Image (spheres, rainbow, N blue to C red):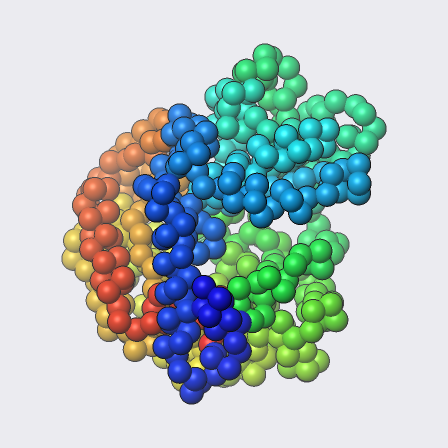
Amino acid sequence: MEGALAALKDEALYLPHADRHRLVAAFDVLSRAYALLSAPSAPSALSYGFRFQGSATHPPDLLRVLDSAVANPFPALYERFVMPTLVPPEAGGPDLIGIGITYEDQLVPALSLARLLRRQCPTRPIVAGGALVTRLAAAFVRRPALVGTTGPFAPFDAFVVQEGETALLAVWDRWQSGRAFDDTLPNLLVRTGGSAAAPTLARGPAHVEDVARLPTPDFRDLPLSQYLLGDPVLPLLTSRGCYWGKCAFCTHHRSYGPEGGFRARPPERIRADLDTLAARHGPSRLSLVDEALPPRHLRTVARHIRAGGLGHRFFADMRFEKGLSGARLEEAVAGGLRLLVFGLEAGSARVLQAMRKGAELDVAARILHDCRRQGIRTAVMVFIGFPGESVAEAHATARFLQDNAAVIDAWGVGAFSLMEGAPAYVAPAQFGITSVAAEPDEELSGRHDYVPRTGLAAGAASRIAAALERQRAADPRPTAHFPRELLAALK
Ligand code: SF4
């Protein structure tokens, strides 16, 4: 492990003519270490990025995993590595604790941490927020036992729904004043009555942040030297929501609420963010974590990094936009762009149109080739089984990946899920869905079973996706298995 960790931090191994196998071997050792660490907890497993695989989207399963010293490796890890570093509030430790939960595989680590912190800091507010908590707000109201004394979300005092900056300040002000939480707190879901085991919940008024006024994120409290790679990757948002916002399967916009929608940070604030991060951390690796980076922001970021000699390198998710020309990409590379991640979703023009993706296959292929010519790494995401997709159309997706393999460094595949709040869930008939199950298939997943009018059934789509995933796993190119931070670090 020591050799592997040193190799991952060795910038020389990321140079174009370095022996790539040393990096591959280091990442392999890391993956094996996670497998070893996970072995006693099987079938639960821990992998790179502290991701947890295990059945935990059904409340009884989640509680069983949380309570099990075998299936849940997190309490022991936290007790050993995190809790000893926590300063008690009386000695200047945290006054308020916020835990963000974005993905389902973060539930077990996040809830395990919240339980321990609740014991350690019994008098301090602990708040949950993030995209998954926003999505789960309706489930909490439907099933208050989830947040009751014996529920998995018991340790939290309040839940941020949608954006959290003003909400966290409101929690803090209210806590300091000694008054109880109520439904006047913006963007917060709080307990207002009922029983301890099944409380009544109330949600405060919706609040939309003014993205022009938010400060640059501050990472100075973090032990950045402990980052696995040589330079840490710092996340930065240049917009909230998605400027396209039409894809039938997508729920990203829900984190910002119908009231919020797309909001772009003004260019002068983006430039100030880049300057501030350079002043604090020097030339950095940045992950622009916008749902889809607007092309004009790509230009703003790249031009400013270059003009200011800031030395940042960055990667981002973007759409296959016609305007993303070779010249634009060349300018972006000169300003530090290293990797673009694209959601292509399907390799059939008809399916792309049906899902309102707004992408064209020939444009996608042209952009991928232009990226290769400019030395920009690429990752492409697809899924199988959008309602109405036929077997032949699913195969077209596999063919697109195959035909363009030389210009795609990494790709990911999944099966279609009908998520609560997605346009296809809100208006199923418009997207070829004849019926939708009233309840999610598991209470905490937000996924609903559905019946498509034509095309692949959900089970068949999952089987094709699994076959494609096996192909991906067998890809002999080492970069195909690198996480995006590592891919973006390659020079
Ligand atoms: S899938 Fe991507 S481009 Fe489409 S609406 Fe969602 S975030 Fe936007």
198 above or below 30? Answer: above
Query: Residue 421: percent from the left, percent from the top?
Result: 45, 38
* Residue 105 place in picture, x, y as percent: 44, 44
Look at the image and tell me in which quarter the N terminus lies: bottom left
Taking the image as shown, residue 276 lies to the left or right of residue 390, namely right
The residue furthest left is 392
**Quarter of the picture for ligand 1?**
bottom left
Q: How far across and down, in percent of the image, does residue 477 sit?
A: 30, 73
**Residue 175 picture quarter:** top right
Taking the spot 55% from the left edge, 58% from the top edge, the residue there is 290
Tell me which residue sits at (69%, 73%) in the image. Answer: 282
Q: Report the number of numbered marks.
A: 0
Residue at image position (56%, 71%) is: 230
Which residue lies at the image location 50% right of the left edge and 60% below the top edge? Answer: 292
Residue nearer the viewer, 102 or 254:
102
Query: Residue pushed farthest bottom?
Result: 17
Q: Quadrant of residue 277?
A: bottom right
Look at the picture and state if 491 lies above or below 417.
below
Q: Nearer the viewer, residue 423 or 92?
A: 92
Residue 328 against residue 437 in the figure, above or below: below
Toward the right, the furthest residue is 177
Q: Is residue 402 visible?
A: yes
Q: Is residue 208 visible?
A: no
Q: Position of residue 196 (x, y in %)?
A: 59, 15
Would you say 75 lies left or right of 445 here? right
